[in-house]
Amino acid sequence: MLNAIVLIKATPAQVSKLGPALAALDGVSEVYSVTGDEDLVALLHSNDTEQVAQLVTGRIATLDGVLDTRTLIAFRQYDPADISFGT
């Protein structure tokens, strides 16, 4: 399973409409409104990079009010149980 984080800049007036629209897309597991340079963050779960590319460029980036996207592909997930303190 491939995990991706999509950082989304949006027109301020559209953020409250974009959140539910993003969450309804197949392949989007979670959507958050956030503070900082981006307005929304979407978490994607997919089988491959091509599906992520199609979802981001073909569906997310074309939604009314989306100004810009940045996509981060996750390589590895860490768990607190993985932490070793020199033992």
Image (cartoon, grey):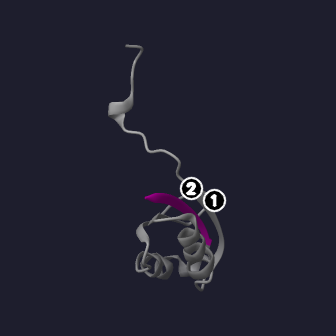
Q: Where is residue 27 drawn, in percent x and y?
A: 44, 72
Q: Residue at x 35, y 34 (%)?
A: 80
The CA distance from mark 1 to mark 2 is 19 Å
Decide whether residue 4 is among the magenta residues.
yes
In the image, taking residue 50 as reference, residue 85 lies left or right, namely left
- The amino acid marked with disc number 2 is Ile
- Name the residue carrying label 1: 37
- Single out the residue that lies furthest toward the left: 81
Q: Which residue is drawn at 59% across and 68% down?
A: 8
When the figure is inspected, residue 2 is found, relative to residue 15, above or below; the finding is above
- Which residue is more in the foreground, 83 or 35? 83
The residues colored magenta run 1-9
In the image, taking residue 25 as reference, residue 8 lies left or right, namely right
Q: Report the quarter where the C terminus lies.
A: top left
- The amino acid marked with disc number 1 is Asp
Could you tell me which secondary element the residue under label 1 belongs to?
loop
- Which residue is more in the foreground, 10 or 71? 71
Q: Tell me the number on the disc at residue 62.
A: none
- Name the residue carrying label 2: 73
In the image, taking residue 48 as reference, residue 29 lies left or right, namely left
- Single out the residue that lies furthest toward the bottom: 64
